[in-house]
Amino acid sequence: MTEPTVVKLRIPRSAADHVDDVLMGFDEANVPSLSAFAPEEGADIMDVEAYFPDAVDEAALQSLLPDYALRVEALPDVDWVSQSQSMLPAITAGRFHVYGAHVADTLRPGQVGLWIEANQAFGTGRHETTYGCLKALDWLLKQRRYKRILDLGCGSGVLGLGAAKARPVPVVMSDLDPVSIDVARENAQLNQVPMRLSAKAGRGAQIFTATGLADPRLRAAAPYDLILANILARPLQDLAQSITGAASPDGNIVLAGLLDTQEAAVLSRYLAHGWRLKKRISTGHWPTLILRKSL
């Protein structure tokens, strides 16, 4: 029987990369979801919470993080999805309005409504990274028309579905997690976004499980003149060459899922591949970076 567990610790912001690596690599069969936040504005420390779907070996984990005091707590057996739904407010990011059924009456004329319920996949629009990406998408859609958009690591599908609802453009959405893809497809139905078998033309979304940009379906739809990548700092760095290869020569990319302490390392990798920073959106300690190829 599983016992969901949360591990809590306070760390210096400078240690974020190291602690992230330890927690994510601790148990391959019991991978956590991470949350990190500053206890107060401008603080140089961060509170980290790692939510494991099963119990963890506290002594073994403490031995890997000897400099920090860990608090390990078993989570009560409650319906977290239902509880989360009742607590989540609607949010507005530019033209996009993300809401659940319990706050459907908050949608206003002229907004692009995204009906997203709390679920098993990352992305309800309430996290700073998703909010920043929606703001970036709103800004970019005012600048030009796009022919093909990729939502890489789409999670619940907020970004890709937002793009498909805002413009009559084909959108490709992929994630390495099959559960996320199931949720994204459910959300496409909720939001009346047509499902497509390919993404060559026309409004709608092609949604499938894929590991990296080597997947033949992702290659077949390339090049993309807009790539949305709200993942994590390390994968963003590792994928810099692949993302560059999948982008059109005059394309834009949006990078998110990184802390401000990780921004320089991520940005330098893309600058080396010919990108330049066009706009930065700050949401707490989670920056969203909009880049364009240097022409």
Image (spheres, grey):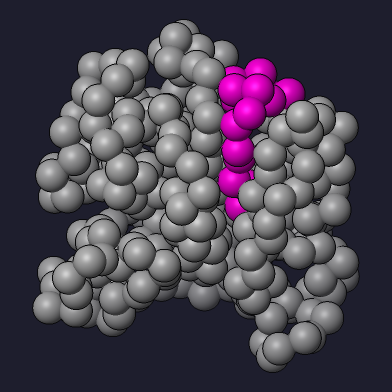
Q: Quadrant of residue 273?
A: top right
| Main secondary structure of the magenta stretch | strand
Q: Quadrant of residue 274?
A: top right
Q: Residue at x 77, y 29 (%)?
A: 295
Q: Residue at x 23, y 17 (%)?
A: 197
Rendering coords of residue 72 (x, y %): 58, 72
Decide if residue 27 is in sight here. no
Q: Residue at x 19, y 74 (%)?
A: 108
Rendering coords of residue 8 (x, y %): 62, 74
Compared with 176, 2 (above or below) is below
> Which of these two is toward me, 104 or 15?
104
- 84 vs 64, left or right, is left
Q: Which residues are magenta?
A: 241-256
Rendering coords of residue 46 (x, y %): 73, 77
> Which of these two is toward me, 11 or 246?
246
Compared with 171, 154 (above or below) is below
Compared with 203, 62 (above or below) is below
Counting the numbered discs, the total is 0
Q: Quadrant of residue 260?
A: bottom right
- 13 vs 26, left or right, is right
Rendering coords of residue 54 (x, y %): 45, 55
